[in-house]
Image: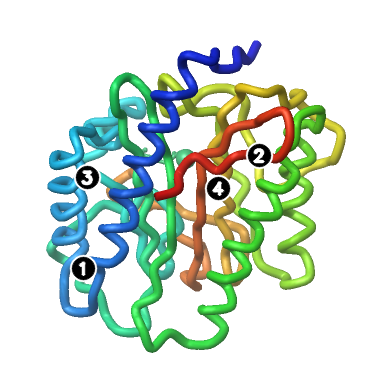
Amino acid sequence: MIIPLSKNEIGPMREACKVAAQVLDRTAKFVEAGMTTYDIDNFARKVMEELGAESTCYNYRYGKLVFPGYICISVNEEVIHGIGTMRRTIRPGDIVSLDVVVRHKGFVGDNTRTVLVEPVAEPVRKLCEVTEGALYAGIAAAKRGNRVGDISHAIEQFIKPHGYGIVREFTGHGVGRSMHEEPQVPNYGKPHKGEKLRPGMTLAIEPMINMGTHLIDIAEDGWTVLTRDRKPAAHAEHTILITEDEPEILTVL
Ligand code: MF3
Ligand code: CO
C-alpha cells in the first residue's frame, strides 16, 4: 500500500529535494580532471553541511555492508554506488555519475547527474544524452491515472532504438520520509501494469544505462556496480511528484 504525501508534507519534501538538487549542481560544477573521487565526495559532504542536510548514503546499511561515502560517485564502467577514493583520479574523457541523496527536515531528496569531463568521445556523450532523454520520457509518463509500468515502458522504448543495455537489478523507487519506499520503478516493463499513480506520490526515476551488455558485476568492495563488459554506463535521476496534471520535478534548483 503506497500512501501519498499529504498537503502538509509536500512543502518540506519540495524543500529537501531542492537541497538535494543544489548539492548535486554545486558538486557537478566542482568536478575536474586531476582530482580524485575522494575530493568530490569531500566537497559534497561540505556542501551538505553548509545547507543543513544530512547524507542518506553515509553509513547506509545493506546486510553487513556499511556505505562509507557521502554520495555515490561512479566513473565510466562503474554504473552506480561507486565510493569516493584517493585511488581514483578523474581523467579527461571520463564520465562521472554523481548520485546525491539527502535528508532535510525529515524528508529525502534523491537525484543523479552524469558529468562529462571533456573531451568525451562521441559515442559516450551520446550514451549520456540518451540516458537523460530516457529519464524525461519516464517522467512524461508519470501522470495520474497511469501506472508504474507506463513509466518503465516509456524508458525502455526510449532506449530500445539505441541498443543499449538496461540494468535490471536496480530500479527507481518511491521516496519520501525514507530513501527507498514502495513502489519499485524498473527501467523496463509493460504498459498498464503495476501500481496506479496518484497525486501526492513521490518517485525517484533513475535509468541506469550501459553502452554494451545489461549484465553487471559487483566489485570487491561489495557496493560498486560495474558493467560486466567494462564498457561505460550512464545514470540520470530526478525525484518527482505526481500531481493532478503534469508531473512536477522536485529536484530542481
Ligand atoms: N540513489 C541511490 C539509490 O536509490 C542511492 C544509493 S545510496 C547507497 O539506491 F548508500 F546505497 F549507496
Ligand atoms: Co535513487
Which structural element holds mark 2?
Answer: loop
**What's under tag 3, amino acid-wise?**
Gly
Q: How is the image coloured?
A: rainbow
Q: Is residue 198 left or right of residue 174?
A: right
Nearer to us: label 4 or label 2? 2
Q: Secondary structure at mark 4?
A: loop
Mark in front: 1 vs 4: 4
Inter-mark Cα distance, 3 to 1 = 14 Å
Q: Which tag, 4 or 2, sits closer to the chain's start?
A: 4
Note whether ligand 2 is within 8 Å of mark 4. Answer: yes
Q: Earlier in the sequence, mark 1 or mark 2?
A: 1
- The residue under the point 49% across, 23% down is 10
In this rendering, would 227 be left or right of 73? right
Q: Which residue is labeled 3 in the image?
A: 69
Q: What residue does disc 4 label?
A: 206
Q: Please rate how many residues cluster around mark 2, counting C-alpha atoms within 10 Å: few if below 14, some from 14 to 19, many from 20.
A: some
- Tell me if I can see residue 171 in this picture: no
Q: In percent of the image, x 27 and y 80: which residue is there?
A: 91
Q: Is mark 3 within 8 Å of ligand 1?
A: yes
Instruction: Give the residue at x 54% y 15%.
Output: 7
Q: CA distance from mark 1 to mark 2?
A: 38 Å
Label whose residue precedes the other's in the sequence (1 or 4): 1
Q: Which mark is residue 247?
A: 2
Marks 3 and 2, the one that precedes in the sequence: 3
Q: Position of residue 251 (x, y in %)?
A: 45, 44
212 displayed left or right of 221 = right
Q: Please, which residue is most extreme toward the right here?
A: 192
Q: CA distance from mark 3 to mark 4?
A: 20 Å
**Identity of the amino acid at label 2?**
Pro
Q: Which residue is mark 1?
A: 88
Closer to viewer: mark 3 or mark 2: 2
